[in-house]
Image (cartoon, helix red, strand yellow):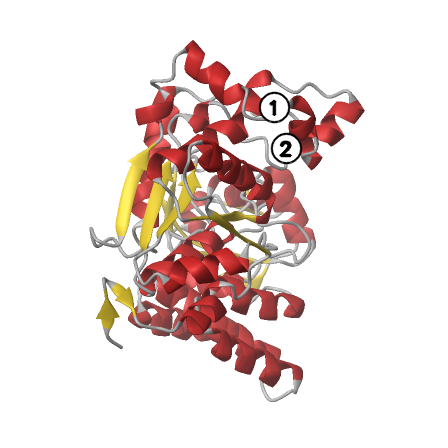
Amino acid sequence: MGARNGVDEHGVDEQVRILTSGAVDVVDEADLRRKLSEGRPLRVKLGIDPTAADLHLGFAVVLQKLRQFQDLGHVAVLIIGDFTARVGDPSGRSKTRPALSEEEVEAHARTYLEQVTGILDSAPERLEVRRNADWLGELDLPGVLGLAGSVTVAQMLERNDFSTRYAQGSPIALSELLYPLLQGRDSVEVHADVELGGSDQLFNNLVGRTLQARAGQEPQVVLTTPLLVGLDGTEKMSKSLGNYIGVTEAPEEQFGKVMRIPDDLLEPWATLITRWDPDVVAEFSEALRGGELPPVEAKRRLGRRVVELYHGPDAATDAEAEFDRVFKDHAEPSDIPEVRLPAGSVPRRLARVLADAGLVASNKEGRRMLEQGAVRLDGERVNDPGAEFAPADLDGRTLQVGRRRWARIRVG
């Protein structure tokens, strides 16, 4: 397909079909169509506050949507919220976030950029990276007061998380009330045509439209994406809940985790995490519902796609083969981590060895795994919670807990 002014010449209808696939909110589609019909690269803003060390697939949903805009010829304007991260986004929060230091924010920003550029097209004409401390850090008191005067307290309290906390008597810091205004100011500074965000960002993104109109700019289109349900099938994907897949996790780990998701996540995950064309997603869903695509094969397709997106097609093939080696053929993984334990003549409880090897979190969990028959030593089940072994008798042997945790013991 040819290009005009750097924009892939998909028709407006085709672009809207692709870009709104899986979206929750589009405010509004008529504005999006009009902007697309101008035939110029749109400036598509996404702000990320570097508040943790790494990203998971839940956040990658909106990044994949941004990549779709890039693939259609538009410009991704990525805002690194090195200033707003120190304020803390109140979206979806029941209490004030703890403040981060400037050093913590900077360390997280570096890792975010490394991970984000593995998803986005990093060509200079397709990606613009900005830091909002460049303009928000320069605001003086008159500037802050002018920003604060853009909306009323009543408008702020229309926001669900603020109104709920206010009704419950939970503290709301004044800095939290300023956060949507700071995010909206970002849109003014970069002249955003479109802003992306998770569905919990709708209020913040709409504030950006208000501030742009006050600044004499054409208000941005707001497009939000769903919050991805995690591996447990119930809660939003979160590192703190342990129901996540990290974008930098090993290919075998990513593939294995996808194979464990509940069947009812297959269709929404196909829509949100694959960057497949909507027609491909529709075919996938129809085959799944009609029984032509068994859920286990659907999970394989999703697993291969996830690994392909973050590690490449060869890694996807290898990850699937490794999964089959371990879980179909019941063979040892090809790359078992070695764990070195101190030498000694005194026998040690196996539950303690499991904890020292990092296969369980504690001696108590080790005993529980033994009682449940989840522990194997060189493939033989050990279910005595009081089992003891001399260190020399464990040297070179393989411990397995459940189906996914392995370690080869080295002593001395």
- For residue 328, say whether it is visible: no
Q: Residue furthest top?
A: 141
x, y percent for residue 168? 79, 25
Q: 318 or 411, which lies in front? A: 318
Image quadrant in which the C terminus is located: top left
Point out the residue furthest to the front here. Answer: 216
Picture coordinates of residue 74, whole percent (x, y)? 32, 58
Res 267 seen here: yes
Residue at 35% in and 71% down: 318
Question: Image check: 259 left or right of 165?
Answer: left
* Disc 2/disc 1 C-alpha distance (Å): 7 Å
Instruction: Quadrant for residue 310, please give it.
Output: bottom left
Residue at left 59%, top 35%? 91
Task: Kindly identify the amino acid type of the residue bearing the numbered disc 2.
Answer: Arg
Where does residue 265 sit, x and y in percent of width and height?
Answer: 62, 65
- 382 and 150: which is toward the camera: 150
Say whether residue 316 is left or right of residue 97.
Answer: left
Say which element carries label 1: loop
Q: Eyeballing the image, is 293 above or below 309?
A: below
Q: What is the crowding at mark 1: few (fewer than 14 residues within 10 Å), some, or many (at least 20)?
A: some
- What residue is drawn where x is 61% and y is 23%? 96
The residue wearing badge 2 is 93
User: Which image quadrant for residue 231?
Assistant: bottom right
Mark carried by residue 96 = 1
Contact, mark 2 vs mark 1 (Cβ under 8 Å) = yes
* Image position, residue 135 (x, y; %): 33, 25
